[in-house]
Amino acid sequence: MNTARNQRHALLINLTRFGDLIQSQPVLSKLKDQGLVTHLVCLENFARAAELLHDADFIHAMPGARFLALLDSTWPMAIVELQNWINSTASVEHFDQTINLTPSLSSRLLTSQFQSEHKLGFFLDELGFGCYSNNWAAFLQASSAHRGSSPFNIVDMFVRSAHLPTQKTKLKIKAPDKELISQMRNELSTKTQRNNFAGYVAFQLGASDDKRRWPVEYFALLGEMLCKELNLCPVLLGTKSEQHLAQKYENLSQAPHISLTGQTSLQELSATLSLCKLLVTNDTGTMHLAAGLGVRSAAFFLATAQPWDTGPYLDNCLCLEPDMNCHPCSFSHTCDTGFSCRKAISPETVFKAITHYISTGEWRKMEGQGAKVRATCLENDLYTLRPLNPGAQNNYSLWMSTQKHFYNLFLNDEALTVPKDTTRPEKDYCQNIVEHINSILPLLNLAAQQANVLKKVAAPAVKKKFLSTWQRLSHILSQSSYFPVLGLLWTHQSQAASSNLEEIIALCQRYEKLLQKLNNFLRM
């Protein structure tokens, strides 16, 4: 690797899956805006996805599967090969910044192997303890264990965890090659059963988990309506492992359609999406790829999925959730209804929304029809969701909006002000949260007082009382149904501050102030 000595280099480590890798694009772009030569470390099986990203000057694909296989057979050779790979990657003698966006121990260990002036995101201290570089990185770590409970989109958390400017954040990946677009246009034209369609609508039938997948029969009904009423041809997308879904669609549908499931490379998938008027999809990597290309989507968020943290980072996309009190469910949830949420959103509801979008370019307000319907928008340098029907303004949604406002100020160490939109959840819902907060506030106050005494008198009895209070507080917060991410954030931050009683006292006071402000707002 030939690099000029006077150039500044940044190393970005992201050892996550396809969708999250695509969503780290704004970090690379903002590093490039600062004049840095950028290096991206990703897993080898996602290296082709990394090639879709702008502003990655060097891509270092880590053969994680090979290292793991060697560990099973001859671990000394695995260590040698890992070190050789690190040496080849670190041919730049010094990185100005190493940014690790993956909170796992393995990724932190990898971060420690590179010489860097500044380590941001997640790393290890000199004693081997896990560290994070700011409040946002700590929140990102907490939310990774509670996906579905965070009010912030992961793109916004990536940018803030990397200490980068938050203004004008955009997710914009490389445009497909023009020749490839022409090739895919010809292939779509060849595969259609007639050549007078008004356009194409892409269908992503699969999902990471069947319980998060809108039924194939619903896709088939929607496809028939789009074809018959709007003269739009459905194009089925997906991997080889999802070909059985495409086959089921073909068996069910009586209308023309094209199946490219299992037949496209990532570059061909990108070119195909760019030819479509819209993507109808489950919560998938394809959805994030489309957002990076500027292709709008109508996306379903079912079972454990919800759009606050994993929705498409592009304005004017449609997010649909089942209008059910049990949604979103936790990852450990055992469903008693056979995940009936999958069938709560009807094809007719989606068709009506798409019809209006195709004719106007906007998503219309809707009546409640089994769905919570929202449109994405980027405002005040944060991803947000605009409600389009009454179901999207339920108690849970209003509580998420409240958390988003206060947590943003809290994580930025800014004054905690009342939101301009003072819409709150219903009185009984607010009262339950207020009662929960009132059970936590005295413990925070007590912990601060005990830490202050312990600072003056390091007696075993005082230390024991303080530890008992801290454990009780951590347990209540971590088990909270209203503050699951905040509970884990408290655990991370209080453990990091455990060696400094002044920091513990200040932390207790910060959380006490946050919860008191929330308390006052909910009681207004």
Image: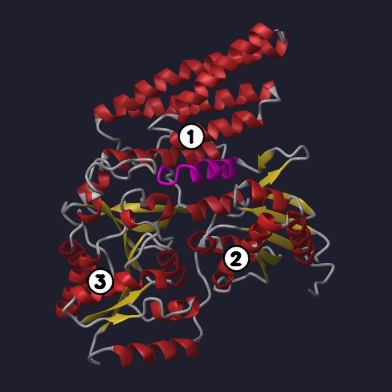
Tag nearer the camera, 2 or 3: 3
Q: Position of residue 92 (x, y in %)?
A: 80, 65
For the residue pair 237 and 480, the one nearer the viewer reads as 237
> Viewed as shown, does residue 244 lie left or right of 389?
right
Q: Position of residue 357 (x, y in %)?
A: 25, 69
Identify the amino acid type marked 3: Lys
For the residue pair 307 and 67, the one nearer the viewer reads as 67
Tag nearer the camera, 1 or 3: 3
Q: Is residue 163 above or below residue 279?
A: above
For the residue pair 496 and 145, the one nearer the viewer reads as 145
Question: Does the magenta-highlighted stretch encompass residue 145?
Answer: yes
Q: On the image, numbered disc 1 is attached to which residue?
A: 486
Q: Earlier in the sequence, mark 1 or mark 2?
A: 2
* Contact (Cβ within 8 Å) of mark 2 with mark 3: no
Secondary structure at numbered mark 3: helix
Tell me if mark 1 has few (under 14), some (14-19) or many (20+) residues whose alpha carbon lies within 10 angstroms of its own: many
Identify the amino acid type marked 1: Leu
Can I make out residue 121 in this image? no
The quadrant where residue 131 appears: top right
- Please give the name of the residue rendered at 44% of the width and 35% of the height, measured from the top-left corner: 484
Q: On the image, numbered disc 2 is attached to which residue?
A: 29
